[in-house]
Image (cartoon, rainbow, N blue to C red):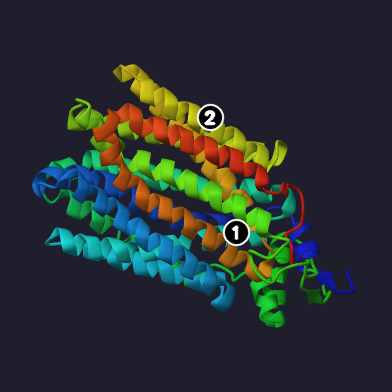
């Protein structure tokens, strides 16, 4: 190429290289550390309910306060990502929630733990949409959805590690939950790796007029693929109606995205934050509860694997809606489960379909918006969804009191069904270049 070429033309022409793999794994490790922190909360609740003699309402506040921080963090993180860069925000958020998690291990009271969990949430909420945006902006278009689903699959790795820590460490002593949270401080160290080891988004650099840096990054990726180009690098053509995420051209997409994020968050965090405690409430021993939760968690991995294939064959929207319908049916099956075997089977199905849906949702979210508002669009959708993740843990004690576990998962099943319906408001962007 000798004439000017756009970002999409250059990046989309590349195969998946070692540079792409390093970006995916580097971002994925941060993602797994996020999941580790969020997943540990369920086991901390199980320990503190007896050690601190916490009521169900107090337990729900521990779960929800972190999500309140995530709601604020997701919105602010998206705005900052469009202003100072994806990589910078990614590293900063890892540092914030890593330090806060380590401090939470030293909590001396319920109030102190709530403060630290809120700070943890600020970092967590900002990190997730920023990481998916960064990876999406580098991935070649023909496999972009699959790459983002693979990134999201690192969540299952982190959640599985959390389940192992919860099973092996938390019950060993009264300080087991403190040691578990101390392990959750690892992201503070990993922030250094992200800051200096991962590239900044080329599309962001061009949008900020940093053409020389953007060109250098693109040439590094081309060199990894054995391609050499001296062509001038220019931004992708700006699409119509990019003033804001609620502008006429984006309003329908934003509405659908916010609804899906809200109801998926409500069901996922309501269910998986409370499952260990609900199992104990329904007569399971603590050890059996932790065993079942670990097995249920492992079912996340094949869910991601199938979603990674389907987003590039069926498409993003069809995959998302199918997995959400599967999640709804699984939640209703859990509501009607009446034996250890059916509880385990329904829980595994819920884990499989729900996490596959998350993978498809993270694949489609960055594709909905142009570069100028991609960070804030993804961040605001995640932030709105976090409102539901605040409400869900708080609602569980009331739902249990009104109709037990059956009512809890019946409500979650309806929420998944609403999310599936809202997914049809989203565009299908499989195989298309990202908007400039």
In the image, which is nearer the foreground, mark 1 or mark 2?
2
- Regarding residue 18, the answer to whether it shows in the image is no
Task: Determine the secondary structure under disc 2.
Answer: helix
Residue depicted at x 79% and y 74%: 234
- Look at the picture and state if 404 lies above or below 238: above
Q: Is residue 282 left or right of residue 120?
A: left
Q: Earlier in the sequence, mark 1 or mark 2?
A: 1
Residue 360: quarter of image: top right
Outermost residue, front side: 402
Give the x, y percent position of residue 293. 32, 34
- Look at the picture and state if 302 lies above or below 244: above
Assess disc 2: are there few (<14), some (14-19) or many (≥20) residues with their C-alpha within 10 Å of its C-alpha.
Answer: many
Give the x, y percent position of residue 180. 24, 51
Judging depth in this view, the residue of 405 and 432 nearest the camera is 405
Residue depicted at x 57% and y 77%: 83
Task: Quarter of the image for the C terminus: give it.
Answer: bottom right
Distance from the alpha carbon under mark 1 to that under mark 2: 27 Å
Give the x, y percent position of residue 186. 33, 61
Task: Determine the secondary structure under disc 1.
Answer: helix
The residue to which callout 2 is attached is 326
Q: Is residue 245 left or right of residue 98?
A: right
Residue depicted at x 21% and y 47%: 57
Please tell me the numbered disc located at residue 399: none
Give the x, y percent position of residue 354. 48, 37
Task: Quarter of the image for the N terminus: give it.
Answer: bottom right
The residue to which callout 1 is attached is 135
Q: Disc 1 vs disc 2: Cβ atoms closer than 8 Å?
A: no
Q: Is residue 2 left or right of residue 322?
A: right
Q: Is residue 217 left or right of residue 61?
A: right
């Amino acid at each position: 190429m000798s004439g000017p070429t756009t970002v999409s033309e250059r990046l989309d022409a590349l195969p998946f290289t070692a540079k792409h793999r390093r970006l995916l794994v580097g971002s994925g490790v941060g993602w797994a550390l996020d999941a580790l922190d969020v997943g540990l909360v369920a086991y901390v609740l199980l320990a503190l309910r007896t050690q601190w003699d916490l009521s169900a309402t107090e337990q729900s506040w521990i779960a929800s306060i972190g999500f309140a921080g995530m709601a604020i963090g997701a919105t602010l993180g998206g705005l900052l990502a469009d202003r100072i860069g994806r990589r910078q925000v990614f590293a900063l958020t890892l540092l914030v929630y890593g330090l806060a998690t380590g401090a939470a291990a030293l909590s001396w009271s319920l109030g102190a733990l709530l403060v630290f969990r809120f700070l943890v949430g600020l970092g967590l909420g900002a990190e997730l949409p920023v990481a998916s945006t960064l990876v999406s902006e580098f991935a070649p278009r023909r496999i972009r959805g699959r790459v983002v689903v693979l990134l999201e699959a690192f969540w299952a790795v982190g959640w599985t590690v959390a389940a192992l820590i919860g099973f092996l460490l938390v019950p060993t002593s009264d300080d087991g939950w403190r040691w578990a949270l101390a392990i959750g401080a690892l992201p503070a160290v990993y922030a250094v790796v992200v800051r200096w080891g991962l590239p900044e988004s080329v599309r962001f650099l061009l949008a900020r007029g940093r053409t020389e840096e953007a060109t250098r990054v693109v040439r590094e990726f081309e060199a990894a693929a054995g391609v050499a180009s001296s062509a001038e690098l220019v931004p992708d053509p700006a699409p119509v109606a990019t003033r804001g995420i609620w502008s006429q051209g984006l309003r329908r997409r934003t509405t659908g995205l916010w609804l899906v994020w809200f109801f998926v968050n409500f069901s996922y965090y309501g269910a998986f934050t409370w499952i260990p405690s609900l199992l104990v409430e329904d007569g399971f021993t603590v050890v059996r509860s932790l065993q079942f939760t670990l097995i249920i968690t492992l079912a996340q991995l094949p869910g991601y694997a199938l979603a990674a294939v389907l987003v590039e064959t069926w498409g993003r929207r069809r995959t998302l809606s199918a997995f959400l319908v599967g999640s709804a049916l699984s939640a209703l099956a859990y509501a009607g489960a009446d034996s250890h075997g059916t509880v385990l089977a329904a829980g595994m199905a819920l884990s499989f379909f729900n996490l596959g849906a998350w993978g498809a949702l993270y694949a489609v979210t960055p594709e909905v918006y142009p570069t100028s508002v991609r960070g804030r669009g993804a961040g605001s959708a995640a932030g709105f969804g976090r409102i539901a993740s605040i409400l869900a843990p708080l609602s569980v004690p009331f739902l249990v009191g009104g109709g037990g576990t059956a009512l809890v998962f019946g409500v979650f099943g309806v929420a998944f069904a609403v999310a599936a319906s809202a997914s049809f408001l989203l565009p299908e962007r499989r195989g298309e270049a990202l908007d400039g």
